[in-house]
Image: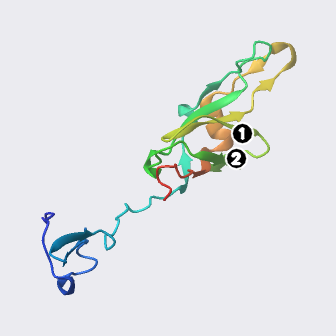
Amino acid sequence: MERAALVWRQEAELRAGDEIPLGRARAAGGALAWDVTVRRYARPLGRPRLASGTATIPWDRWRVWASAVEDDPPPIGRQVRVDTSEAGFVGTPCYFAGPVRTLGGGIGNLTGLFVSIADASPAGFTYRLLFGFQTGDLGPVELPADLLARVFGTPAIPWTAVEAATSEETP
């Protein structure tokens, strides 16, 4: 294991890249002068600010999405939490999510349905899919997870996220 060390070197002995000069000492007119213009500032490696993925989440993990508005009939769709913690975001990024694609069986993609993102955080977001059905006098109909799985297959949510640089990281 390597350890940090503070050593004095002649300028010609300095191994640039392996060693970082903190300054230069010079004797001038009987006095010692410290010159910091040779100092190199090390910065941490930049981390990615763009990430994307596909979250494959079975219908039985989706929860009912009911409207918060009193006049809207619940339920109005399904929602699920998408985990993006592996992207390593520090701040809350701007998330973009596409329509649900389906894998394995079913009738294909759930296109044309309203999609929204809520509760965004550095670790993820809530993906909401509007597809509550009205049946006239019977009111809203909630589709059970097993029926959704048979009809649409396993849902896969494509997402992309972009995190803005913070003022502390800007040189």
3D distance between C-alphas at marks 1 and 2: 7 Å
Decide which of 65, 58 is in the foreground and name it. Answer: 65
The 10 Å Cα crowd at callout 2, few under 14, some 14 to 19, many 20 or more, is some
Q: Are marks 1 and 2 in contact (CB under 8 Å)?
A: yes
Give the image quarter of residue 81: top right
**Residue 8 shown left or right of residue 91 in the figure:** left
According to the image, label 2 marks what residue?
99
Q: In this view, does 171 lie above or below 71?
A: below
Colour scheme used in the picture? Answer: rainbow
Indicate the position of residue 1 as horizontal and vertical percent values. 12, 64
- Residue 95 in view: yes
Question: Of the residues shown, which amino acid type is indicated by label 1?
Answer: Val
Q: Residue at x 65, y 33 (%)?
A: 147
Question: Of the residues shown, which amino acid type is indicated by label 2?
Answer: Pro
The secondary element bearing badge 1 is classed as strand
Identity of the residue furthest to the right in this view: 136
The 10 Å Cα crowd at callout 1, few under 14, some 14 to 19, many 20 or more, is some
According to the image, label 1 marks what residue?
115
- Residue 156 in view: no
Q: Residue at x 69, y 35 (%)?
A: 129
Give the image quarter of residue 70: top right
Indicate the position of residue 125 as horizontal and vertical percent values. 56, 38
Decide which of 83, 23 is in the foreground and name it. Answer: 23
**Residue 92 shown left or right of residue 3 in the figure:** right
Q: Which of marks 1 and 2 is nearer the N terminus?
A: 2
Q: Which residue is drawn at 17% across and 71% down?
A: 32
